Amino acid sequence: MKYQSIVNNKIQCEICPRKCRLKNNQRGFCYVRRNHNGQIVLDSYGYNTGLAIDPVEKKPLYHFYPNSKVLSFGTLGCNMGCLFCQNSHITKVQTPIEQCQKVSCEEIVKTAKKYNCEAIAFTYNDPIVFFEYAIDTAKLARKENIKTIAVTSGYINEEARKEFFSYMDAVNIDLKGFSEVFYNKNCLAHLKPVLDTIKYVALETNCHLELTTLIIEGENDQYLDMECDWITENIGYDIPIHFSAFFPRYKYINRLQTKFETLQKAYNLAKSKGLKYVYTGNLATITTSSTYCSNCKKELIIRNGYNIIENNLENGLCKYCKTKLYGCF
């Protein structure tokens, strides 16, 4: 395996910033990467937790071929330790991998073609931990002119980052909060590697980028002002951002779900900072899920949640003033 080294007679995994040092047969923090006789192996390769067809808006990607169909899949495990994980039934439960559905890369691409899916999305758990499975699938997908999408925390090391995103056509990065304290306490991780990944994708790749922040009241909502400032100063005003509501899960089962009013406040804040494309996700109104022209301010894509009601784009341009909309259309 390319991304490994030997440290103190242990094999160190170099995929993500955790750099787990593993004895023989020991698993990493993610659960699915293991030292097998001096080589890091991906035990979940070829296994997934089921295939599903979704609208691309559900990833969420609102500026990447709107209203197209996506074949989504994930595996087990995660390299983040989020106490509020919304998919803990697959990321945190150490289910025997053999109990998962066995599906080859070729079968995934064949299924996408069969159901006329324009893209394959690596999602549900973080594709960084099933790095090889995702990349091998992406290579085959590109041969069939099928796009690839990563839904990820962005918690990945520099060299692995370069290879991973070279095979992705679009990505939604989950910026979980704009505080090192928040990342340490709630994700058992660090903020800087995520920011480095966001800047890398935005500035050094052709990969379409959108961001998501899951807002937990009293935990990360107080950092949104700094988050918006960092986005505008480092990657500009065009990158779409989605604010989504937390629902009680995993270690935060006794916390209250996020109110829509909190998402609305975040939406208004981001707009006031000059961000052009701001959305609320899993709790939304037509106003907060629609896309507006950055120039004439007219409604370009009118949505009710993930459903498109009206599309006023012509070849990626506003039909009223001909301003180009950021994204792939």
Image (spheres, grey):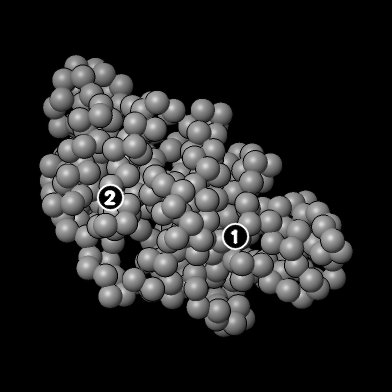
Kindly indicate the quadrant of the structure image that contains residue 103: bottom right
Q: Is residue 55 above or below residue 295?
A: below
Q: From the viewer's side, name the closer residue of 98 and 274.
A: 274
- Kind of element beneath mark 2: helix
CA gap between label 1 and label 2 equals 28 Å
Label tally? 2
Residue 20 position, x and y percent, is 69, 61
Res 126 visible: no
Relative to 248, is 175 on the left or the right?
right
Q: Residue at x 49, y 70 (%)?
A: 91
Residue 81 position, x and y percent, is 50, 64
Residue depth check, mark 1 versus mark 2: number of the one nearer the observer: 2
Numbered tag placed on residue 129 in the rendering: 1
Kindly indicate the quadrant of the structure image that contains residue 287: top left
Kind of residue sitting beneath label 1: Val
Kindly indicate the quadrant of the structure image that contains residue 227: top left
Quadrant location of the N terminus in the rendered image: bottom right
Q: From the viewer's side, name the closer residue of 142 and 13.
A: 13
Question: Which one is earlier in the sequence, the residue at label 1 or at label 2?
Answer: 1
Q: From the viewer's side, name the closer residue of 12 and 108.
A: 12
Res 252 visible: yes
Q: Are marks 1 and 2 in contact (CB under 8 Å)?
A: no
Quadrant location of the C terminus in the rendered image: top left
Q: Residue at x 34, y 49 (%)?
A: 213
Numbered tag placed on residue 278 in the rendering: none
Kind of residue sitting beneath label 2: Asp
Q: Which residue matches tag 2?
A: 221
Residue 23 position, x and y percent, is 79, 71
Q: Is residue 43 above or below residue 151?
A: below
Q: Residue at x 62, y 52 (%)?
A: 17
Q: Residue at x 75, y 67 (%)?
A: 22
